[in-house]
Image (cartoon, rainbow, N blue to C red):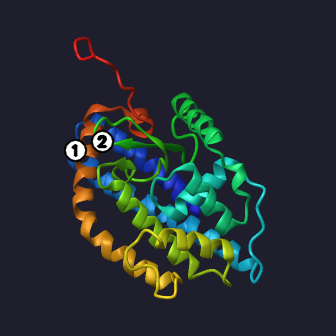
Amino acid sequence: MAESIENIERRIEELRAAVRRAVMARDLARARALRAELRSAEKDWEQSLTDLTDEAELDTAPSKPQAPLVSVREQVHHALTLLSVPAAPKLIAEVHAAFYGASATGIAAGKLTHLRRDEERSFRTARHSRPYYLCSALTAEHLAPARGLLAISTWPLERRIIGPLSPRVDFLTAAIRVAERATRMPKEDLGVTRLLWRFAATIPGAVEPRGAASAATVVAAAQAELNVHVAADQSQREEAADRARRQMDEPEQLFGSRLRVLRGTA
């Protein structure tokens, strides 16, 4: 029997506490093992959430799912979970509108700026009181908040780092995720088709001779280009993530450091 999402959330919280205890006890070998287990549990949580979303979509077939009465916070979480990479408000809104039937006007950049600040205040007030937080993507160079990009706190730190190659890698990854989800739609949807074509338009080989952009073609073309960049990008992200773990506390790893101008450098 599959583990319930509630049990997975409890397991994640227990593992986070265990990692913290291991680090404080300077048991680095155990801390590394627990972090690997934590990453696995976080992947289980994301897959469980995706499965629940798919079940909800199938329950409403053949009609497109109606917009649920959920908060903007939950809408952003749904879209980011589908994309699996940090994203800007415009893309988050388009993805949610295409796949979940909600109006894109509800997810505005200004609202998301305030939302991210509220998430940070909540985390600093009572850490881990929520299953997830909407946080910042971090620049690899300065470990500061990447302008206009949101992520999910349960993602590995490496996935939330933005290096020189990361924007393109994340774009291609998002294209693949959107195309894969499109293949599971109960019927063709105009909003999803438009979104898929927008991705395809900037990926070599993704648009077919007659101007169409099938999901299978987009996946193949995006994956081919992704293979060129992904190893170098992952190496840059891992180096920055290791630096962040050494230099930053937990809130800063989620919401970024604050850049300071040092005397003599301005």
Residue in the foreground of this view, choosing between 23 and 223 = 223
Amino acid type assigned to the residue bearing label 2 in the image: Ala
- Specify which label sits upstream in the sequence, 1 or 2: 2
Q: Residue 146: where, in percent of width, then height?
A: 42, 41
Mark seen at residue 28: 1
Q: Are the residues flagged by discs 1 and 2 in contact, CB closer than 8 Å?
A: yes
Q: How crowded is mark 2: few (under 14 residues within 10 Å), some or many (20 or more)?
A: some
- The quarter of the picture where residue 129 lies is top right
Mark seen at residue 38: none
Q: Residue 133: where, in percent of width, then height?
A: 54, 44
Q: Residue at x 23, y 17 (%)?
A: 265
Q: Which residue is drawn at 30% across and 55% down?
A: 165
Amino acid type assigned to the residue bearing label 1 in the image: Leu
Q: Residue 112: where, in percent of width, then height?
A: 61, 42
Looking at the rendered structure, the secondary structure element under dot 2 is helix
In the depicted structure, whether residue 98 falls above or below residue 147: below
Residue 253 seen in render? yes
In the depicted structure, whether residue 44 falls above or below residue 149: below
In the depicted structure, whether residue 75 falls above or below residue 201: above
Residue in the foreground of this view, choosing between 30 and 261 = 261
Q: Name the residue under label 2.
A: 22
Residue in the foreground of this view, choosing between 222 and 211 = 211
Q: Residue at x 23, y 42 (%)?
A: 27
